Image (spheres, rainbow, N blue to C red):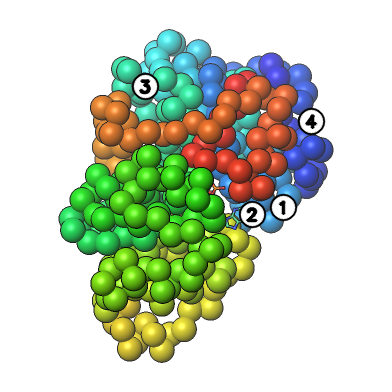
Amino acid sequence: MKALLCTRYCTPDELELIDIADPAPGPGETVVRVRAAALNFFDNLIIAGKYQHKPPFPFSPAAEFAGEVESVGAGVTGFAPGDRVIGNIGWGAAREKVAVAADQLIVMPPGLDFDHAAGLTVTYGTTMHALRDRAQLKPGETLAVLGAAGGTGLAAVELGKLMGARVIACASSDDKIAFARQHGADDGVNYTATDLKDALRALTGGKGVNVVYDPIGGAQGEAALRGMDWGGRYLVIGFAAGDMPKLPLNLVLLRSYDVFGVYWGAWVQRNPQGHRANMMQILDWCAQGKLSAHVHAVYPLSDAPAALKAIAARQVMGKAILHP
Ligand SMILES: NC(=O)c1ccc[n+]([C@@H]2O[C@H](COP(=O)([O-])OP(=O)(O)OC[C@H]3O[C@@H](n4cnc5c(N)ncnc54)[C@H](OP(=O)(O)O)[C@@H]3O)[C@@H](O)[C@H]2O)c1
């Protein structure tokens, strides 16, 4: 089978497309024929050796996938060849087949296609955990989403609306804000053209927003914190801009703010039932057309470097999908 391999820490162009042996399912495992694999922001970090996980070489990027069960190993019940499934394995899905522990798979509902199902888990799973489990977002509250056209950002726009919030999409271009509005955002702030703190206050009658969802950090992270209302909740999702903001703790004290760390992958390990329940809700909403799981573009495996470079260049809206 074909596999996209990282054989040493490298750039996207240095990944190698190589023929390797097909996997066989071990006890408790299934082999899944990958029909679509989804890339995330962290795939560029993992191949460069700059991510918190450092898999042994050689490994494939792409954490998540959708496909069909091809074979099952000893002791596997509940799955049979032909079942349509999704999975999240951290890395390793940019190849034609993966061997996966059966308890890491979730059956796809009818009506959902592989391309849209492949990229649901990391972005919507993280965001459901952030908004519902951590911030406990309530109907009528105001939610500011940074990087609102990216993978996690779009998920926050859509899930925030479904949870009844007024959503302010914050992004670096008018096109990205228009895209977020098409997916339900009520208002938009272009933070390359406007001061984010002032804009958030202006849009909320001077009070500020209730919740900030921040996957980018940097200067905009602090500006968004300063644009929160009394008792505001700030969700630390990631640092796509590269810099980790040093939050002014005097503001946390003076304005009674809560700052929530969101380490979704670790939470999934600690609470697999909670994760499964969140995913069932996400899949159900997606199958009903309430979530878009927007696909920016589909790339053949041989074009994966172009997909990774588009993510790094802030060009991808929603998800970049690979077809092994
Ligand atoms: N905490 C968790 O458990 C968890 C889970 C999943 C992902 N994450 C993290 O969340 C972050 C975002 O992930 P994602 O999937 O949403 O990524 P994405 O789809 O690539 O979107 C990231 C957004 O960040 C903004 N951005 C600002 N500066 C950037 C830069 N220098 N390079 C690239 N993008 C930049 C861009 O929006 P604008 O152009 O509009 O500014 C871009 O759309 C990453 O750091 C990722 O590792 C964390």
Q: Mark 1 points at which residue?
A: 49
Give the number of marks.
4
Amino acid type at image mark 2: Tyr
Q: Name the residue under label 4.
A: 16
Q: Name the residue under label 3.
A: 112
Q: Do the residues labelled 1 and 2 touch (CB within 8 Å)?
A: yes
Q: Residue furthest top?
A: 82
Q: Residue furthest left?
A: 139
User: Between marks 4 and 2, how big is the CA–CA gap?
Assistant: 20 Å
Q: Is residue 146 above or below residue 98?
A: below
User: Ligand 1: does it lie within 8 Å of the C-beta at label 2?
Assistant: yes
The mark nearer the N terminus, 4 or 1, is: 4
The mark nearer the N terminus, 4 or 2, is: 4
Rendering coords of residue 183 (x, y %): 36, 40
Question: In the image, 264: left or right of 19?
Answer: left
The mark nearer the N terminus, 4 or 3, is: 4
User: Between marks 1 and 2, how big is the CA–CA gap?
Assistant: 6 Å
User: Between marks 4 and 3, how big is the CA–CA gap?
Assistant: 31 Å
Disc 4 crowd rating (10 Å Cα; few below 14, some 14-19, many 20+) is some
User: Between marks 3 and 1, how big is the CA–CA gap?
Assistant: 34 Å
Amino acid type at image mark 1: Gly
Mark 2 vs mark 3, foreground winner is 3
Residue beneath the point at 45% across and 49% down: 177
Residue beneath the point at 53% across and 63% down: 193
Q: Name the residue under label 2.
A: 51
Disc 2 crowd rating (10 Å Cα; few below 14, some 14-19, many 20+) is few
Q: Can residue 277 be seen in this view?
A: yes
